[in-house]
Each structure stands twice: as structure tokens, then as C-alpha cells.
Amino acid sequence: MDKNTLNEENEQILADKVPDNYLGFATVCTIVCFAPLGIFALFFSLRVNQLWEEGKKAKARRMSVVVRHICVWTIILGFIFWIGILAGTGYNIFGYRR
């Protein structure tokens, strides 16, 4: 077998595989981290399967990558958000007093 045949077989295998919709990841990110951005992740994760069933396979794969990126940004913003909440609470309790 030559290299082109192997590439064609790999592409065929990947073309038949449904992309991951990251629904669990999006749900946890929404509940634990930062809900406003997590809601977008949930919406787009549900869209992945819908696009796949409509036959829009390339768009479903791109949407899967978008969901993963949104989830990562949800974690980053959630971390910043919760650190800010804890810092604000700490400052309010133990903060500057005259």
C-alpha cells in the first residue's frame, strides 16, 4: 500500500466518525465555572449532533472544535471570576479600615 491509499482510508474512517459534542464538558463548565459563557457552549454542543444528522459533516466538526474552545475559555473566565469574588469578599471582611 502506498501513502495515498493509507491517507484515503484514514479520511474515510474519520468521515464516518461522529465528532464529539462535549456535552458533559459544557454542562460542568456551565454549572461550576462561568454560566454566561457556558450557556453558549451548551447550545453549540447540542448543535453538533443536529448538524451531523443534517449531513453537514464539515460544519459539525468545526462546531465541535468551537465547543471545545468555548469550554476552555469558560474555565479560564470562571477561574478569574471566582478569584475576583473571593478577593472581593476577603477585602470586604478583612479589608482596609480607618
Image (cartoon, rainbow, N blue to C red):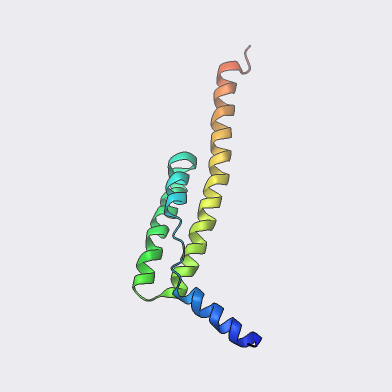
Quadrant hosting residue 52: bottom left
Q: Nearer the viewer, residue 34 or 58?
A: 58
Residue 89: x %, y % from top left: 54, 24
| Image location (x, y in percent) of residue 26 | 45, 50
How many numbered marks does the figure carry?
A: 0
What residue lies at 53% left-to-right and 79% top-to-bottom? 11
* Residue 40 location, quadrant: bottom left
In which quadrant is the N terminus drawn? Answer: bottom right
Residue name at image x 59 percent, y 87 percent: 5
Q: Is residue 54 left or right of residue 24?
A: left
Q: Residue furthest top?
A: 98
Give me the residue at 45% from left, 44% from top: 28
Q: In the displayed structure, does residue 47 sit left or right of residue 84?
A: left
**Which quarter shows the C terminus?**
top right
Q: Is residue 8 above or below residue 31?
A: below
Residue with the most extreme front position: 1
Vertical placement of 78 versus 96: above or below?
A: below
Give how far across and how far down residue 39 sits, in percent.
41, 50
Q: Which of these two is toward me, 37 or 19?
A: 19
Q: Is residue 60 above or below residue 4?
A: above
Percent of width and height locating residue 43: 39, 56
Residue 96 lies, with reference to residue 66, above or below; the image says above
Q: Is residue 59 left or right of residue 72?
A: left
